[in-house]
Amino acid sequence: QKEVEQDPGPLSVPEGAIVSLNCTYSNSAFQYFMWYRQYSRKGPELLMYTYSSGNKEDGRFTAQVDKSSKYISLFIRDSQPSDSATYLCAMVNRDDKIIFGKGTRLHILP
Amino acid sequence: DTGVSQDPRHKITKRGQNVTFRCDPISEHNRLYWYRQTLGQGPEFLTYFQNEAQLEKSRLLSDRFSAERPKGSFSTLEIQRTEQGDSAMYLCASSAPGGAYEQYFGPGTRLTVT
């Protein structure tokens, strides 16, 4: 089993819809949970990070961590065509080692 | 622009040649990371520096790969005797001390080995 599992998609949703992106993980030592957005042929861009369980909101984005289920989510409200990108989850353990998921390709249809 | 920069952005080389990439981190960040990303995959950790010290190397970093950060500022990644399997995007990121959860990435160097 890989340490971080993420459905590669593609996921296509109509403009304005709520998008839900998810990752599962197996290593209970992970402490920080991040979401990156990556446009084609660009470097990843940090959207937000959370520490431990709970929710964190930033504008149209909400990150959710459930450590008991080893499950993290990113919700995008009022999705826009400009949100079309690959979304990568990433996690850091106590040794500062970072593991990325494969990324989910998201298409927002106008 | 005070973000992470990488040079070159694209490199095409023939198998067996050596290539070197450069990364300039955000100026106040003392941690610098190198990753490799292939199509359809997330970035894979290669190595990282804290100041000029190379603290960890992945087993992905074969003997043909070497990285340096001589003065704790910019870093170089060299690949010797390139192979077609080395074709990938090479990403650099930087962070503040203890801030592995808040890494900022450069635009990457896309390497194609023919």
Image (cartoon, rainbow, N blue to C red):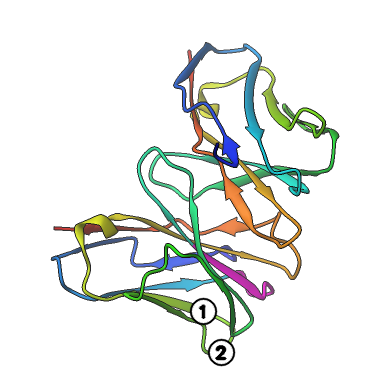
Q: Is residue A30 above or below residue B84?
A: above
Residue at point 71%, 54% (across, down):
B101
Kindly state the secondary structure of the residue where label 1 is placed: loop
Which span of residues is magenta-colored? B26-34
The verdict on residue A56 being magenta is no
Chain ID at mark 2: B
Residue, x 39% and y 37% (percent of image)?
B40
Left/right placement of residue A31 relative to residue B88 reads right
Residue B31: x and y, percent?
A: 64, 72
Specify whether A6 is left or right of A97: left
Q: Are marks 1 and 2 in contact (CB under 8 Å)?
A: yes
Residue position for label 1: B74
Which amino acid lies under the numbered mark 2 shown in the image of this protein? Lys
- Above or below residue A62? Residue A90 is below
Marker disc for residue B71: 2
Q: Position of residue A34 (x, y in %)?
A: 68, 43
Q: Which three-letter amino acid code belongs to the residue tagged 1? A: Phe
